[in-house]
Amino acid sequence: MSEQTEHYVAPYDAGVSFDELPDSAPSGKFKFSFTGWLGVIVVAFWVLIALLGPFVAPYGENDLPFPDAYSEFQKPQPGAWLGTDDSDRDVLSRIMYGAGRTMGISFLATVLAYFVGVVLGIGAAVSSPKVDMVISRINDALLSLPSIMLGLVVVAAVGSSIPVLIVTAGLIYSSVIFRLSRALGMEIKVSDYVEAAQARGEGRWWIITKEIWPNARMPLITDFGLRLIYVILFISSLSFLGLGVQPPQADWGSMVRENLGALQYGESVFSVIAPALSIATLTVAINLIVDDVSAHSGGRLSNRL
Amino acid sequence: MSDKSNQNDDIVFEAIDLSINALRDDKSELPIVKGVNFKVRRGEVVALIGESGSGKTTISLSALGYCKPGLIFAGGQAKLLGHDVTKMSVNELRPLRGEKVAYLAQSAAATFNPSILINEQVTEAAVLHGSKTQQQADEKALALYKALELPDPENIGSRYPHQVSGGQLQRLMAAMALCGDPDLLVLDEPTTALDVTTQIEVLKAFKHVIKVEEAAAIYVTHDLAVVAQIADHIVVLYNGEVKEAGPTETIINSPQHPYTKRLMDAIKPLPEPGQGEQSSDKHLRTSPALEVKQVDAGYGKVRNGKAAVQVLRDINVAIERGKTVGVIGESGCGKSTLARVMAGLLPPAQGDILLDGEPLPPSVRERTTDQLRKVQFVYQMADTALNPRQRIKDIIGRPVQFYDLASGKDVRKRVDELLELVELPVQFADRYPHELSGGQKQRVSLARALAANPEVVLCDEVTSALDTIVGANVIELLKRLRRELGVSFIFISHDLSTVASFADEIVVLYAGRVAEQGPTDRVLSPPYHPYTRLLISSVPETRVGWLEESSESREAQSAVQGDVKLTEKGCPFHTRCPMAIEGTCAELDPPRRVGALGHIIECHLEFDGLS
């Protein structure tokens, strides 16, 4: 175009009809980034170990690789690729046994937390204000207690066993899920499409399952990974304090505690570093996946949390 | 226009073959903006006009060197003061943004931080960039408040954003943008979300301040009438290409390109009597389809038949079969509240609702399925009214199923019929709402309401979120449905032109009270209620120079004086009324005067005094 003061008219085809243009591009399919793939690989690796560990481990959980020698806190060597621990056991084998236990307990506890939290949370969001008030205040009370202290008290009172650990962690974390899903439910409840369903005369069950849940699902699933990390750390912390998984059963948290002595006396610190690194790699890898998923859902999750 | 000799120094912004592409998932590129050329000179306002999807916002943002996520600069240049901003890094751009070029978004309410004083936010950018000391910035801000004709300019800066009205906040946003003395101002639909009365005041202020500050501006809008008032040049865009460009007078008075002509055709005529289509009487029955009698309604707890915040007072409306009642007023006048009362979403504090002559329970929960079926609601924002996780066939099919109008395979057949009825391709049934455009979504929303075979459809601002052409098509569709199906409509809008062409009867609401009510032609011809007169005179004409002429009328002056306030006694309009009677209007409720053909005006003045 030469001069703006001039009148410019674009050439045109006589037959063109000016149809309405779509005002938003269709959103893309979900794809992992490089870091996301890294996360998937690491998590897949640990899941595989958790499932197959007990079958492919070089030794049993409490077997000694060098029964005839003094072998506390040994360096990695043929026969014990990650060295030995405070009771002369093979660290590699114990990590492989512990993987399933740590991840299984955490996973089941998170699932329990979600089940309780989401049912009560969305339930409270659509209930009458009075019911909502009662549930929310009870939840606030639970939320106000420090989770580790509460866990310690419960475990100390009831005694530590794996089912107790799962239920305790599940209930403690359900209070956080309750908050999240209630907030989500509240937000969706006041949207026009839910009001339209109410005006149509739909029942509460339809509104929860067909209108609210499909829209709350995605952010909650994204949050699941994040919450799983917290629960892994929680279970590991309890084990570290000696109230989680009980010896001689292997679990990453308790392995760190048992082998703390290696930092002072041992020839090798692998017995402490290996389980700690296992916890770290697993949680970081889950985080990488969560990052990708929440970026896909428009980063809205981070605004809500 | 400036001298020819130094015209190159004058160019503030220039787009040269500017192309912007969207990145698809498979890394292929989709052109969004296809080689656009235009210039903005100092002291000149260039309007980018087009419908949604035309790329106008994308182009305007390129002046800031910014692309929305997923978009990339694909070619050409966007020169701001001679520098190509498309090739700059974020660090190079930072000193430019806010200092050389400033951006005004559509919604001022979303731009201001609600917990920081206005003045602090207005001056923040200039002080941060180091171009002004706090004191200099404060002085500049004060000068801008005065130039923008804001009330009480000395003290308005020490208020919080929620303490000023929407139109004032929009002007304060202009002050925020201008505080750093930018060379270029980018305005993205700054008046689209405003009421007509407020739009005038904001347009006037913008025009004045741009002149005083000698700033150059890019003005993005879809509204030709607004452009005619404020722009020197117009660039017409469609699908990322310039279709026509030239001086405002040329484009408005003699458009050449068929697309520009089509935009001009879609402009609504001014509201005058006699535009309405004669609706047929063949669907009439003895009793009105829906009637509200002496309804009072509001929000909060209801005590002794009074809500804590009383909005609607003594509303009487009857909708005959196959007819349309238009409800009009500015935001905050209770239009949507009235629709919600009728839909049963907000039980009234007092009064009755009758369906087909039978009393209707006040709340949705107490209504029978059949009563619910007969009254359907269509929302303003189709975006939020359709569940994003349901396919179109489920959205439309659910009412069919729910009200037992069909079952099994017939549901799907009925969905196809309904899609055809609202002029959408049947293939859309399997899509999700986000795969549709704004107008298409609104049609789906309408199809959902019609799926229930309703007798009354409540339309709450159904066209105000749509482009001009698209909105006009939706109105045509509504007219056809009214003719063919005998459905009655309550049509709520702040757009008097649309209502004038569609409604048989108009209810003018002000602050929850009826200001004027009656057959459309009666309401749109004298005698007027002063508020109706204000609304009519505020509708912008697509004519250069209209804004200046209208500013001189006393209605325009009164429009500036404030926003809608609910009052306990007296006439709520008295603060803005040019004819208010001292001591009477503020104290006494206005009497209801009934004229010919059921024409009602609530005013202290007689019919004679009002004409």
Image: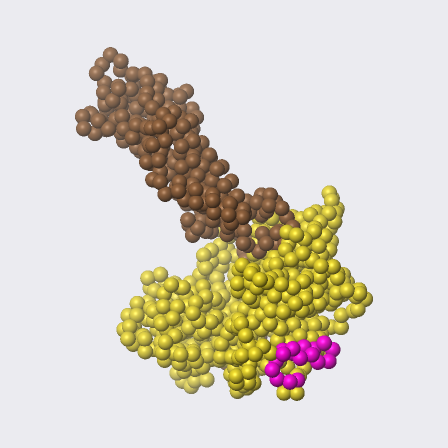
Q: Is residue B232 above or below residue B115?
A: below
- Residue depicted at 48% across the width and 51% down the height: B27
Q: Foreground: A108 or A139?
A: A139
Q: Quadrant of residue B439?
A: bottom right
Please provide percent x and percent y for residue B1: 46, 84
Magenta stretch holds residue B595: yes
At 41% across and 66% down in the image, what residue appears? B112
Residue A108 visible (yes or no): yes
Left or right relative to B80: residue B278: right
Picture coordinates of residue A157, whole percent (x, y)? 35, 28
Q: Position of residue A247 (x, y in %)?
A: 32, 22
Q: Residue at x 76, y 73 (%)?
A: B278
From this view, report whether residue A54 is shown above or below residue B206.
above
As drawn, which residue projects farthest toward the top? Answer: A68
Residue at the extreme front of the image, as rendered = B304
User: What is chain B's hue in the picture?
Assistant: yellow
Q: Identify the hue of chain A.
A: brown
Residue A282 vs residue B487, the one in the foreground: B487
Question: In the image, is A60 to the left or to the right of B362?
Answer: left
Q: How is the image coloured?
A: by chain
In the rendered image, residue B75 lying in the magenta stretch gets the answer no
Residue B174, quarter of the rendered image = bottom left
Residue at image location 65% in from the left, 57% down from the top: B362
Q: Is residue B140 left or right of residue B75?
A: left
Decide if residue B481 is in sight here: no
Q: Which residues are magenta?
A: B591-607
Residue situated furthest right in the rendering: B282
Q: Is residue A178 above or below residue A94?
A: below
- For the C terminus of chain B, the image quarter is bottom right
Q: How many marks?
A: 0
Between B607 and A45, the one lying in front of the other is: B607
